[in-house]
Image (cartoon, helix red, strand yellow):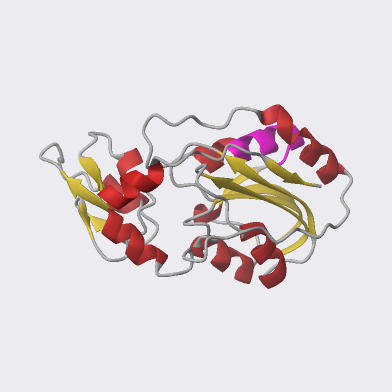
Amino acid sequence: MNAVVFYSNTGQSKAVATYFADRLGYPLEDMETGVAEGYQNLVLVFPVHCQNIPDTVKTFFKKVSVDNLTVIATYGKMGCGNALYEIQNKYQKNIVAGAYIPTKHSYINNDSAFCDFEKLEPIIEKIKEPSYIRLPKLHKNPFANLFPKLRSRLTLTIRKSEDCDGCNLCAERCSFGAIKSGKINRNCIRCLKCVECCPRQALKVKKSLPLKIYLSKKKINKVLIYV
């Protein structure tokens, strides 16, 4: 079985996954709504969270077997970390291609999405004629593994406004049981899926000063491709 599987909270990784599905003619599957137990050729697209592999992706690798894997990590132009190398060493050896793709940061309103899809054509060709590669180890912020969920809670708050009508769509869409009727609990990882899906834009985000300073840094807008 061949497929493109994606994990996406704000639509950025899904857009990249859709490109690969269209070019390869593979079915497009949402990791959170059900996937197969095994694949012959799989393209996996996901966002890095604080330069780390999302827990949802870690769980996926514990349940699924893959013969030929292509791993595509999207990042918000602040640093891609070392997620692909970690995947190869901890979960999956049979990697035929990989990439880090800069796209819109979830916390920056006026940021731009990735659109240079022609740069990804070498990956398409490699998938069609697969051979295994060894991914390089990249620099990762030494603080990336230091309580990332706690750091997110301390630097960014989400509150519901009076525009909330209690539809509870945010709770239905949340993968972590982190919100109910617009109220956030400790399970929240600040992925902002709830903010994106709210039909009344009733969830408001407030950034702390340290986060604002961090987000004002010069952006990294580099596509890294490994074939």
The answer to whether 196 appears left or right of 112 in the picture is: left
Q: Position of residue 177 (x, y in %)?
A: 32, 62
Magenta part, dominant SS: helix
61 lies above or below 155: below
Q: Position of residue 73 (x, y in %)?
A: 61, 49
- Specify whether residue 97 is painted magenta: no
Tell me where residue 133 sits by quadrant. bottom right
The residue that appears at 46% across and 65% down in the rendered structure is: 143
- Chain part drawn in magenta: 16-26
The answer to whether 80 appears left or right of 226 in the picture is: left
Give 1 or 129, whichever is nearer the viewer. 129
The residue that appears at 87% across and 50% down in the rendered structure is: 130
The residue that appears at 55% across and 54% down in the rendered structure is: 31
Q: Position of residue 124 (x, y in %)?
A: 79, 38
Does the rendering let one see residue 194?
A: no
197 lies above or below 79: above
The residue that appears at 41% across and 64% down in the rendered structure is: 148
- Specify whether residue 18 is painted magenta: yes
Give 2 or 183, whichever is nearer the viewer. 183
60 lies above or below 75: below
121 lies above or below 30: above
